[in-house]
């Protein structure tokens, strides 16, 4: 057994990966010391993303940077975990011989044993098949809020996506396990539910299990003040869920719906289950039923055969949908996906131009939306102080962490982080709002 070591962990990619990292830290902390200063770590662990080529490039750069610390710094061992080795360990094992061990997306329970093995002189490939995770304990890396990963994997098989080939088929975490995990997170201002398709929760469990039944159970917990929904695929948003958003006071009036496109022909090629007209109807229905709801989405431009007509249909959708926020991505041709084999691949310069255009369209939508917020008062969760602007900042109900803007505000009195304050909105710049504490 290896003696106690100082371990530093780098977490890359999405919030679902962050949850995996927090579970990894819980496995490690009982036997080893943890540090947030990578240069002080004797063991460096990098939990990787591999969804897109850009994510894989970032992961490789982090690995090579950590390898330099191993060569010239204090680090003794380097371990790579997560999506990158899960899909590509066959290529990586020989090429990245600086790495002492590789583990996949469901192998964190093996970490302590793997550390013992690499300190005994062995180089380890411990990548297994995607499966139910072991253990629910976590070491939180966020303040005042936390993510709860309610399922792993995906069974939708969108033609551009590698997730099913990396994380396997969709697997809901049993409700009782999630309740225990949420209780153990302590007092939270916000619990954020995530999965590759959150609205599909429970499809592989009992008939009585659904996202709504889970939300009702979580809402009963005294340590959870509010619940936020991310990544709800449109075809799985039921009327029952809409009514829960409307009537449950703990459920934040916010939903992230990844539409990905709005042209019917492109949606079909993507193997998406909706139409542009149907998506607009869903948006309008949500807005009519849930007063003030903030809807966010993501879209891909430059998908194979996306001609000018398809792109203009997408632009028109963005103008008409009037989403509170949206993220746009250039299509990435990923080997092994059906879309990579399609004819009609779009030139990089065209993708870049369309990507820029979509952001300009959405920026106009946001500008009009924010005009309607001036003079209104919102409860803002205080999270910090900006030394450059000399203002506090936080999030209102329409701001999810990291992906939406912030609310900056003046306050004559001291502010406690993690508490809510009434802030009257005065102005806006870009995706951020500015106001004054009442």
Image (cartoon, rainbow, N blue to C red):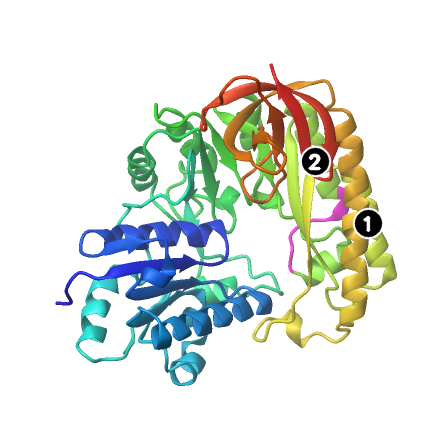
Question: At which x and y percent is residue 384?
Answer: 51, 33
**Residue 330 showing in the rendered view:** yes
- What span is in magenta? 271-277
For the C terminus, give its image quadrant.
top right
The residues bearing labels 2 and 1 have C-alpha atoms spaced at a distance of 16 Å
Residue at point 78%, 54% (across, down): 263
Residue occupied by mark 1: 315
Residue at point 78%, 42% (across, down): 363
Q: Picture quarter containing residue 287?
A: top right
Question: At which x and y percent is residue 207?
Answer: 41, 40
Up-down relation of residue 146 to residue 119 (above or below): above
Name the secondary structure under disc 2: helix
Question: At which x and y percent is residue 306?
Answer: 79, 63
- Of residues 284 and 331, the one nearer the viewer is 331
Residue reaching furthest to the bottom = 94
Using residue 301 as the reference point, say whether residue 154 is left or right of it: left
User: What label sits on residue 283 in the rendered view?
Assistant: 2
Q: Sort mark 1 into few (<14), some (14-19) or many (20+) by Cα contacts within 10 Å.
A: many
């Amino acid at each position: 057994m290896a003696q106690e070591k100082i371990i530093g962990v780098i977490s890359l990619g999405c919030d679902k990966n962050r949850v995996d990292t927090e579970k990894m830290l819980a496995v490690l902390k009982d036997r080893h010391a943890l540090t947030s200063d990578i240069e002080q770590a004797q063991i460096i662990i990098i939990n990787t993303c591999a969804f897109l080529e850009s994510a894989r490039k970032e992961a490789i750069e982090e690995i090579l940077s950590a390898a330099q610390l191993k060569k010239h710094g204090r680090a003794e061992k380097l371990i790579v975990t997560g999506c990158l080795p899960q899909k590509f360990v066959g290529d990586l094992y020989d090429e990245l011989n600086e790495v002492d061990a590789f583990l996949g997306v469901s192998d964190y329970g093996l970490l302590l044993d793997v550390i013992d093995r690499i300190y005994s002189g062995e180089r380890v490939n411990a990548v297994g098949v995607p499966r139910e995770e072991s253990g629910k304990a976590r070491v939180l890396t966020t303040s005042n809020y936390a993510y709860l990963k309610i399922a792993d994997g995906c069974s939708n098989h969108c033609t551009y996506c590698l997730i099913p080939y990396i994380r396997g088929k969709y697997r809901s975490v049993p409700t009782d396990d999630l309740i225990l995990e949420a209780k153990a997170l302590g007092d939270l201002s916000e619990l954020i539910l995530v999965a590759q398709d959150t609205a599909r929760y429970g499809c592989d469990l009992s008939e009585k299990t659904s996202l709504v039944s889970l939300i009702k159970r979580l809402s009963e917990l005294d340590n959870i003040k509010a619940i936020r929904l991310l990544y709800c695929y449109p075809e799985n948003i039921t009327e029952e869920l809409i009514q829960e958003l409307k009537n449950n006071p703990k459920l934040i009036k916010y939903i992230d719906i990844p539409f990905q496109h709005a042209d019917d022909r492109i949606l079909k090629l993507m193997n998406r289950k909706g139409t542009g007209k149907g998506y607009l109807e869903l948006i309008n229905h949500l807005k009519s039923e849930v007063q003030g709801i903030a809807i966010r989405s993501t879209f891909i431009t430059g998908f194979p055969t996306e001609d000018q007509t398809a792109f203009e249909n997408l632009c028109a959708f963005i103008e008409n949908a009037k989403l509170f926020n949206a993220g746009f991505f250039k299509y990435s041709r990923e080997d092994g996906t059906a879309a990579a084999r399609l004819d009609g691949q779009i030139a990089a310069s065209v993708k870049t131009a369309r990507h820029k255009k979509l952001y300009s369209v959405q920026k106009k939508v946001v500008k009009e939306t924010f005009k309607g917020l001036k003079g209104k008062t919102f409860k803002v969760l205080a999270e910090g102080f900006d030394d450059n602007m000399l203002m506090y900042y936080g999030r209102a109900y329409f701001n999810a962490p990291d992906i939406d803007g912030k609310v900056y505000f003046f306050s004559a009195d001291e502010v406690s982080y993690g508490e809510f304050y009434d802030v009257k909105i005065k102005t806006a710049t870009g995706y951020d709002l500015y106001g004054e504490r009442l």
